[in-house]
Amino acid sequence: MPRQKVTKILAQAYERGLAAAAHGQVATYIPELGKANPLDLGISLCLPDGTRYEIGDVEKRFTIQSISKVILLGCAIDRCGAKAVFSKVGMEPSGEAFNSLVELDLRTSRPLNPMINSGAITVASLLKEVMSFDEFMEITRKVCNDPDIAFNEAVYRSEMEHLSRNRSIGYLLESKGIITTGVEESLDFYTRMCSMNVTARSLANLGVTLAMDGVEPFTGEQLLPVRTCEIVKTIMLTCGMYDSSGEFAVFVGIPTKSGVGGGLLSAADDRIGIGVYGPSLDEKGNCIAGRPVLELLSEELELHIFDKADVIDEIRKAEERERARSERGNVSVRSLRHKGARTFMPFNVKDTGKD
Ligand code: DON
């Protein structure tokens, strides 16, 4: 797609996002976040070859907040193993707010997924045993290709002083035997990881690394295992936008994670990483500009996970090849997508003699 066309689409997305931003509010339950300008907006796209398309406040620093849950999950699967992680936390959307405790208290024996606070505090309790926060921050700098990511002491302190809800979640987890050691240490790790300063550009870098199944496009280094990335992206798609995840999957269709600092991280497989910064939030705590921005980008750049527009030609060609072959036997064409390449595999259908 010509550069000019993408630039035009991005400008349109920015306009739509800005219009939406006027209808949201910045987070205030962490008082330091209340200082953000609700009309800030930045959109950064990074392609697998390192090409960037950007508009607005893409270099402005803000705290990563819940987007760090994606890196936390990746590190925990890597260091502790998927089995250990998912023995403590589920893989199901909660349908509740990100900081809810009701389902944990009344309906489940463990947090429903690692993207809600209860799930992430649980995963932090596991990771803190094998990784220091400094190492975690160093890994974050690497996967975001951003050596300037620093710890935001003011936001950390502000959240620690208003931690009643997460502290309740932590002790409920302990009462249920899910956190077995160090509730306060787990909460501290969790709050610290939410307090790292990123930019929309660093999130786009992280997005493209996930889109490329762990390969960092600038160095070609495999930073996370392929299987880990697949799990993380699936959970982003089903749970990353909390109780908006279903709608978001239908209308945007790109694995995405939000943070109350205003960030959004999206990873469209094999195609693009997207980072958005817009601190004006909707009632679910997600960047309110995110939906119109990502919906437009998804539609115009054909990024929806089930968008087949770019493969129609290949399907047709495969069908023609198979039609010729089917004359020799009963072969039907079925499209199967393979990692890294669009190929279509036929499979044999047994001749029942009925038609
Ligand atoms: O634990 C909290 O409440 C925050 N540190 C993070 C929540 C968050 O980012 C929810 N996302 N939209």
Image (spheres, rainbow, N blue to C red):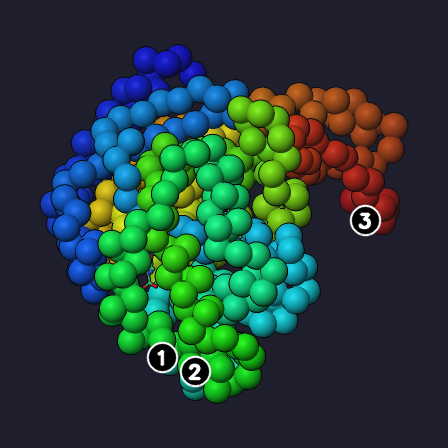
Q: Classify mark 3: helix, strand or loop.
A: loop
> Seen in the image, is 186 located left or right of residue 300?
right
* Numbered mark located on residue 354 in the image: 3
- Local packing at callout 3 (Cα closer than 10 Å; few below 14, some 14-19, many 20+) is few
**Residue 105 seen by the camera:** yes
Percent x, y of residue 337: 65, 36
**Depth check, front residue: 210 or 186:** 186
Q: What's the amino acid at mark 1?
A: Ser
- C-alpha span from label 1 to label 3: 64 Å
Q: Is residue 38 left or right of residue 223?
A: left
Circles 1, 3 touching at the beta carbon (< 8 Å) = no
Mark 1, Cα crowd under 10 Å, few <14 / some 14-19 / many 20+, is few
Quadrant assignment, res 165: bottom left
CA distance separating discs 2 and 1: 6 Å
In this view, 96 is above or below 351:
below
Please name which of the two marks, 3 or 2, marks the residue nearer to the observer. Answer: 2
> Which image quarter holds the C terminus?
top right
Q: Considering only vertical position in the picture, is 99 above or below 138?
A: below
Picture quadrant where residue 296 is located: top left
Q: Where's residue 310, x and y in %?
A: 52, 26
Relative depth, front residue between 191 and 153? 153
**Pick the front one: 344 or 59:** 59
Give the residue at mark 1: 168
Helix, strand or loop at label 1? It is helix
